[in-house]
Image: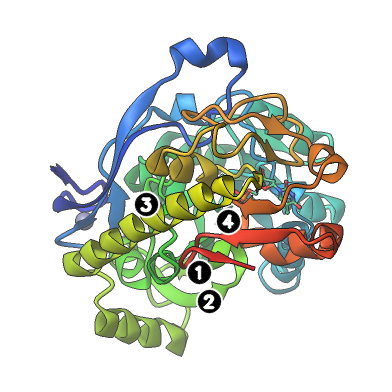
Amino acid sequence: MQSSCRICGGVVLKSIDLGQQPRGNGFLLPRDVENELTFHLTMGLCGSCTMAQLQGEVPQELRYHESYPYHASVSAVHREHFEGNARYFLEHELTGPDPFIVEIGSNDGVMLATIAQAGVRHLGVEPSKEVAELSMARGVRVLSEFFDETTATKIRLEHGPADVIFGANCIAHIAHLASVCRGVESLLGPDGVFVFEEPYFGAVVDNTAFDMIYDEHSFYFAVRSIKAMAERFGLELVNAEPLPLHGGTMRYTLGRPGMRTPAPAVAEFLDEERARGLGEHETLLRFSARVERIRDDLNALLARIRAEGHRVVGYGAPAKTTTVTNYCGIGPDQIPYVVDNTPAKQGRLVPGTHIPVLPPSAFHEDYPEYALLFAWNHAEEIMAKETAFRDRGGRWILYVPDVHVL
Ligand code: DWN
Ligand code: ZN
C-alpha cells in the first residue's frame, strides 16, 4: 500500500500492518457493539521527509468527540510533570509585559490550570467538550474547537501574538498538521516558541511499542522529521529534550529562524537517528517482525496460564489496549476484564474485543494470579500502589519490549 505524505506530499510506503482495528479510544457500551466502526490500521514512512505516519484516517470528529474518555490528570506523575511545565513557562518564557500562552489540546486543564492561577493570559483550544468543561471548572479559558490555520488567525485577531504555543500528546494526533504549522507560524510572536511533547518514534521502535499505533496517533515524530517539517513551514527546530513519559517522549522547541541558538542536542539526535537508520524502511520491517513475535509469545503465555488453571486480568485500559488485544486476538475468554481508574471508561467495553472495563475495586476484591499491564508506561506508579497484589503472590505480565513476567 502506498499513500502520500501529509507534510511534504512524498510517497509513504507501508511498513507495519496491524489489520482491521476499531478506534483506540472507542470504549463502547454493550448496547452499541453492533455499530462499531473499524478501519485498516497501517503505518509507513515518507521516503522524502522521513515522517512516520498512519496511512488511513478516521475523521477527527469521531476521535475527539464530546465524551473523549482520556483525562490527562488521571496520573499523579503526569499532573506533576505538567505543573512543572507551567512553572517553567511562567519563569522563562512568559516574563514580558502581558504575556500570552496558547495550548493546543488542553484536555482537562492539567497544564493551564497553573497558568490560570498565576493570572497569566492564556487560551486552551480543546474540541472535546467534556474535558474542556473540566478545565473551565478549574478557571481555564477554553475555545472548544479544532486548532488549524483558520482558528489561529481568529485567535491572533482577538488576542494578539502568542509568546508560547504548547501541545502535549496532541500535535502528533492532528492529521491536518500542515494547517496547524501554518497556523502556528501566523500566531507566534517574533521571539515566541512552539513547544510540543510527543511520544518519540525512536522509543516506539526501541520498545517495540506497537500498541502506540492506533487511529489517534496520525504521526510518530523523530528529530529528523520535525526538523524537516519546521523548515518547510518557516520555523526552526532549536531544541530536542528527551522525557520519560509514555515510555519515551521528546519535547521539541521551535522558534522563528535565527531568533534562538539551536541547542547541541538537535545535531546530536540527528546523528544518532541517522546512525541507527530510524528514517529507513528496513528498520520498520525489522520492527514489524518483532511485533509478530510478541503476538505469538503473548498468546502462548496466556494459553499456558489458562491451562494451569490460573486467571489473568488486565490492568489499565489505555487506548493501547485496543491495538494489542485486537491485533493478538485476545478477548474476554483469555482476559475476563480489565480495571481502570477512569470513570468514563468503567462499565464500557474495550473496542473490538469487548473485554469489560471495571473499576480497580474489582481487582482488589478478588486478586487474580496474573495481571497483564496494558498501562505499562505507568508501571512504576501502578506497581507502587498495588503492592498487596504482589504480596499475595500475584505476578505482572508485560509485553514491551518483549513478553515477560515480573
Ligand atoms: O496520546 C495519547 C495519550 C496522551 O493519552 C492519547 N492518544 C490517548 C492516551 O493514551 P493512552 O490511553 O495510551 O494513555 P495512558 O496514559 O497510557 O492511559 C493509562 C490508562 O491507565 C488510563 O485509562 C488510566 C489508567 N490508569 C489506571 O487505571 N490506574 C492509570 C494509572 C496511572 C493508574 O494508576
Ligand atoms: Zn514527507
Q: Is residue 285 left or right of residue 119?
A: left
- Residue 179 lies, in percent from the top left, at 35, 43
Front label number (4 vs 1): 1
For disc 3, the marked residue is: 219
Asked if the residues shown at circle 2 and circle 1 are in contact, with their CB atoms under 8 angstroms apart, the answer is yes
Q: Is residue 96 above or below residue 13?
A: below
Asked if residue 394 can be seen in this view, the reply is yes
Give me the residue at 46% from left, 46% from top. 324
Q: Is residue 277 above or below residue 231?
A: below
For disc 4, the marked residue is: 166
Three-letter code, disc 4: Phe
Q: Residues within 10 Å of mark 4 (few under 14, many from 20)?
A: many
Give me the residue at 66% from left, 69% from top. 93
For disc 2, the marked residue is: 241
Q: In the rendered structure, which disc, 3 or 4, sits on the residue that comes first in sequence?
A: 4
- Residue 34 lies, in percent from the top left, at 46, 11
Kind of element beneath mark 1: strand
- Residue 260 lies, in percent from the top left, at 48, 79
Q: Is mark 2 within 8 Å of ligand 1?
A: no
Asked if the residues shown at circle 4 and circle 1 are in contact, with their CB atoms under 8 angstroms apart, the answer is no
Measured Cα–Cα span from mark 3 to mark 4? 17 Å
